[in-house]
């Protein structure tokens, strides 16, 4: 029986969701008498030695690995070194690329939307032969997806040929695909968990109004408007033990915040002063204040503090749970 496992997470970004996943798996495995340790892929030195053999010395004490990252290279090396992975390296590779996922599921009796893979454009050509064929094969609206993307991100609804032309121009250097829009599936989908070829659990997820700006999580624009929100704080949370570049990680999340604000500028706007909150209220808009949870993102630099202020941050916690350059927690988590 497998008795000792290791959870491997990405060294540079660990979301609260991935940490929660590890903790829940650890709780369940503990109840079965199976221990589960935790490391990042930076702490696992898997390499190809001078004699051509895969070396993974850190793995000798573990019966299996719960692989919570998308780094397929390390996954393949660990498997070649004899490590049992959940999920397998091949499953990780296939599931991380949407087009490869659809190809893997094809010819298996599974109904899917018509799917067209965009040719890789190595020279940035604007030739429109391909998109004309797409428009001919798929009626509008058309669903476009970047091949790489998770959590429903990088999915677009293209309503007409002009939008198709613009999308192809802006995505011509990246791997992407086009699919027919299934009207009967609008606003809902199914999450199905399959183990060893057997369906063990399923869940129907519904979004009654089908609005891209509405969801079934804790917060969205529709809920804020229905609750007559004056202002909502949007916190950039950085888990210090999950990255060695907290400043860079915070800016990455802020770029996404800026994108969301721009896409929904008719309903919500960032604020930095009381007057801006009042102005938004007068225009019928919700206000969004950008904040940071974890003073370690400053990396001890007043210049970086000024940078975040200039980006609109108006509130920051000194620390979350870890020591940093400006604060010390009440208790140090090992």
Image (cartoon, grey):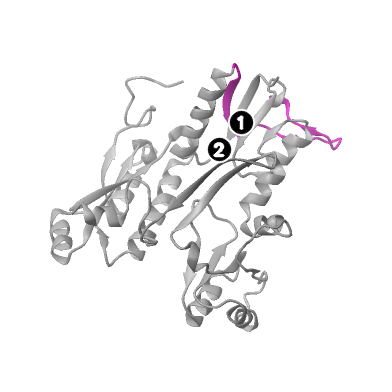
Query: Pointer 1: residues within 10 angstroms few (<14), some, or many (20+)?
Result: few
Residue 1: give its label: none
**The magenta segment:** 33-58
Judge from the rendering whether residue 155 lies leftward or rightward of residue 80; answer left or right: left
* Residue under pointer 1: 43
Residue 47 falls within the magenta-colored stretch: yes
Above or below — where is 183 with respect to 239?
Answer: below
Picture residue at 60% right of the left edge, 79% below the top: 131
* Residue under pointer 2: 11
Picture residue at 38% right of the left edge, 36% below the top: 296
Q: Quadrant of the N terminus?
A: top right
The answer to whether marks 2 and 1 mark residues whose Cβ atoms lie closer than 8 Å is yes
Residue 93 appears in the rendering: yes
> In the rendered structure, which disc, 2 or 1, sits on the residue that comes first in sequence?
2
Residue 86 falls within the magenta-colored stretch: no
201, 272: nearer the viewer: 201
245, 219: nearer the viewer: 219
Among the 4 quarters of the image, the one containing residue 283 = bottom left
Percent position of residue 81, x then y? 78, 32
């Amino acid at each position: 029986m497998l008795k000792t496992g290791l959870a491997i997470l990405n060294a540079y970004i660990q979301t609260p969701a991935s940490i929660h996943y590890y903790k829940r798996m650890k709780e369940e495995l503990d109840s079965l008498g199976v221990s589960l340790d935790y490391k990042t892929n930076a702490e696992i030195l898997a390499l190809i030695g001078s004699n051509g053999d895969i070396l993974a010395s850190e793995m000798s004490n573990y019966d299996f690995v719960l692989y919570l990252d998308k780094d397929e290279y390390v996954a393949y090396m660990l498997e070649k070194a004899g490590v049992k992975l959940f999920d397998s390296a091949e499953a990780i590779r296939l599931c991380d690329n949407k087009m490869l996922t659809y190809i893997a599921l094809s010819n298996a009796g599974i109904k899917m939307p018509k799917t067209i893979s965009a040719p890789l454009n190595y020279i940035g050509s604007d030739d429109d032969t391909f998109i004309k064929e797409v428009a001919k094969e798929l009626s509008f609206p058309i669903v476009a997806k970047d091949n790489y993307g998770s959590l429903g991100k990088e999915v677009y609804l293209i309503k007409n040929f002009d939008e198709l032309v613009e999308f192809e121009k802006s995505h011509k250097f990246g791997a992407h695909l086009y699919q027919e829009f299934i009207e009967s599936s609008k606003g809902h989908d199914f999450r199905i968990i399959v183990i060893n070829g057997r369906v063990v659990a399923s869940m129907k997820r519904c979004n009654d109004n089908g609005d891209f700006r509405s969801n079934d999580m804790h917060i969205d624009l529709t809920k804020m408007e229905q609750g007559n929100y004056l202002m909502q704080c949007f916190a950039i949370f950085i888990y210090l033990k999950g990255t060695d570049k907290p400043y860079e990680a915070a800016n990455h999340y802020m770029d996404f915040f800026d994108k969301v604000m721009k896409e929904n500028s008719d309903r919500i706007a960032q604020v930095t002063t009381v007057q801006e909150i009042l102005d938004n209220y007068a225009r019928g808009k919700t206000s969004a204040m950008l904040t940071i949870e974890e003073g370690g993102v400053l990396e001890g630099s007043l210049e970086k503090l000024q940078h975040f202020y200039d980006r609109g941050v108006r509130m920051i916690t000194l620390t979350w749970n870890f020591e940093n350059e400006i604060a010390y927690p009440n208790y140090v988590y090992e």
